[in-house]
Image: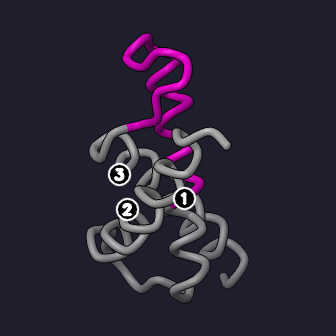
Amino acid sequence: MNHGIIMTIIIGFVIGVIAKLIMPGKDPAGFIITVLIGIAGSFFGTFLGRAIGHYQDGQSAGFLMSLLGACILLGIYHLITRSRTV
């Protein structure tokens, strides 16, 4: 198994928790949703980093890029859930 994927998931777990603390406003997501968004954000950060040439193939995103990806996805999640509740 590719160790890059495992590290992305582990970093994403931690990032999800931190992103929940950073993002302002009431968060309608529970812990599991937030962690899944953090993991997805880590993969998103890896994708963004590779797209701009910051990471090579096989490298996973670092802490800051994962946090950026998770905050972007959590913000999008807030917009979607807010528009559904209004």
Q: Residue at x 40, y 46 (%)?
A: 66
Q: CA distance from mark 3 to mark 2?
A: 6 Å
Mark 1: secondary structure: helix
Against 30, residue 77 (above or below) is above
Question: Which of marks 2 and 3 precedes in the sequence?
Answer: 2
Residues tagged 1 and 2 counted as in contact (Cβ below 8 A): yes
Number of other residues with Cα within 10 Å of mark 1, as a class: few under 14, some 14 to 19, many 20 or more? many
Q: Residue furthest front?
A: 1
Number of other residues with Cα within 10 Å of mark 3, as a class: few under 14, some 14 to 19, many 20 or more? many
Q: CA distance from mark 1 to mark 2?
A: 7 Å
Residue type of the residue flagged with mark 1: Ile
Q: Position of residue 69 (x, y in %)?
A: 45, 46
Q: How many marks?
A: 3
Q: Residue at x 46, y 58 (%)?
A: 12
Quarter of the image holding residue 52? top left
Left or right position of 22 against 43: left
Mark 2: secondary structure: helix
Magenta span of residues: 39-61
Residue type of the residue flagged with mark 2: Ile
- The residue beneath circle 1 is 39
Number of other residues with Cα within 10 Å of mark 2, as a class: few under 14, some 14 to 19, many 20 or more? many
Left or right position of 68 against 82: left
- The residue beneath circle 3 is 67
Q: Which mark is residue 70?
A: none
Residue type of the residue flagged with mark 3: Leu
Mark 3: secondary structure: helix
23 or 68: which is nearer to us? 68
Question: Which of marks 2 and 1 precedes in the sequence?
Answer: 2
